Amino acid sequence: MSAIFLTWSLGLAKIFLALAMGIAAFRVLRGPRAQDRVAGLDALYVNAMLLALTFGIAAGDTLYFEAALIIALLGFVGTVAFAKFLLRGEVIE
Amino acid sequence: MNEFAKLPDWAAIIIAILILAGAATTLIGSLGLWRLNSFYERLHAPTLGTTLGTGCIVLASMLCFSVLQTRLVLHEILIAIFVTVTTPITLMILVRAALFRDSVERAETLSNMHDGSHPATSELEVNHSRPPEAT
Amino acid sequence: MKRHPFLPLAAFGLFILWLLLNQTVSYGHILLGGAAALVGSWALSALRPQKVRIRRLGAIIRLSLRVLVDIVKSNIAVGRIILGPARQERRAGFVNIPLELRNPYALATLGCIITSTPGTLWVDFDATKGTLMIHVLDLIDESTWIRTIKGRYERPLLEIFE
């Protein structure tokens, strides 16, 4: 009984997170300004990471954790690089 | 979905609630990214996902694998720590970039108005408040 | 050439990170993790970071609990603002806060705390004047926010780090 509840709530959580990713992607596409797009990208990768973790729980596989960690690392570096670019116009000083 | 049958009832229910709470919080945060009006307000919204959203889902994952493998599985906490430590950096640089770009655009608009050749055509995004000038 | 100082906290952190990533406490990994921690902290000490002195474990635990509670509370508050009606009497704005904290580690911790409670964002810290600028989503009264940040977070941080 509780296993069915868990399965359902996992499915619902995946839908929620996918929707959240969609909204973040909407903000990336829509703008209106460059900093909005970068903020959207930031939210997008955090949501993607959480989605990977949820998939990991659903599949019962800790391998997804590694994917989530890599998404978090690369997303952070990417967002900082973009923000830095907005700040100065060049990434490496 | 067979391995969930091995979970005891209490664990399954707690995991389900944690996951739903985390996903819902993240969704609300992203909704804020859509609904709020100015850039500085919108920047607050994703922090919902990076704090409570991440926290809940990480806790659920830790609980799930700890019970399934009957040993302490703690490595998901690294994600929580990493996200907590990196979010301030991203947001701080983003806010600074936005302030910098706003001030550049304001200066350009002012100089255009001063020239008289281009009456202020570029409409600035209206913020509810400007940062107080440092005096 | 001066000998690099040993950084026990950084080495310990790296060691724990290694064990967590490999998900084991077997002897081989303890040895490997120890070696990685020593090399890593030695490399880090080449940057000559400022010495960190942490005191009062009780204060740390009390502060962490308080921050956890505040995170949940402000999540709910911001969630209510987002889901509420689009036109509402709410003003967002910048607040300048004079701080007594000077320790960079304490400031970094304060930055993490302020950013991870939704509704407040760390914008800029002016080291010469010692004022911190934050952006607040729901700005009712400036002095309340100044009192909150200084009383709730700055005082325990001063206790812990200085």
Image: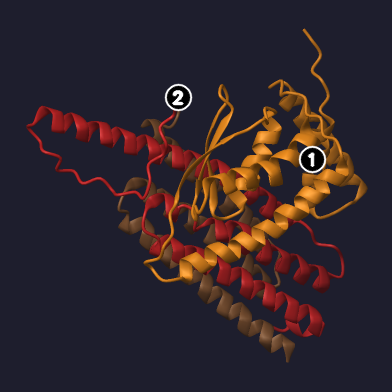
Chain colours: A brown, B red, C orange
Q: Quadrant of residue B13?
A: bottom right
Residue at left offset 44%, top offset 52%: C92
Left or right? Give the position of B72 relative to B91. right
Q: Is residue C21 in view?
A: no
Residue at left offset 39%, top offset 41%: B98
Residue C88 location, x and y as percent?
40, 65
| Secondary-structure class at tag 1 | helix
Residue at left offset 37%, top offset 56%: A28
User: Is residue B78 placed above or below A81 in the rendered structure?
Assistant: below
Q: Quadrant of residue C154?
A: top right
The chain under label 2 reads A
Left or right? Give the position of C92 relative to A2. left
Q: Is residue B116 in view?
A: yes
Q: CA distance from mark 1 to mark 2?
A: 30 Å
Q: Which residue is mark 2?
A: A93
Q: Which mark is residue B55?
A: none
Residue at left offset 49%, top offset 70%: A18
Q: Which mark is residue C13?
A: 1
Image quarter where the N terminus of chain C lies is top right
Crowd tier of the residue under label 2, counting other residues whose Cα lies within 10 Å: few below 14, some 14–19, many 20 or above: few
The chain under label 1 reads C
Left or right? Give the position of C59 relative to C96. right
Closest to the observer, C116 or A48: C116
Residue C18 location, x and y as percent?
78, 45
Q: Quadrant of residue B48?
A: bottom right
Which residue is outermost to the top? C1
Say what amino acid the circle numbered 1 marks. Answer: Gly
Image quarter where the C terminus of chain C lies is top right
Closest to the observer, C161 or B90: C161
Say what amino acid the circle numbered 2 marks. Answer: Glu
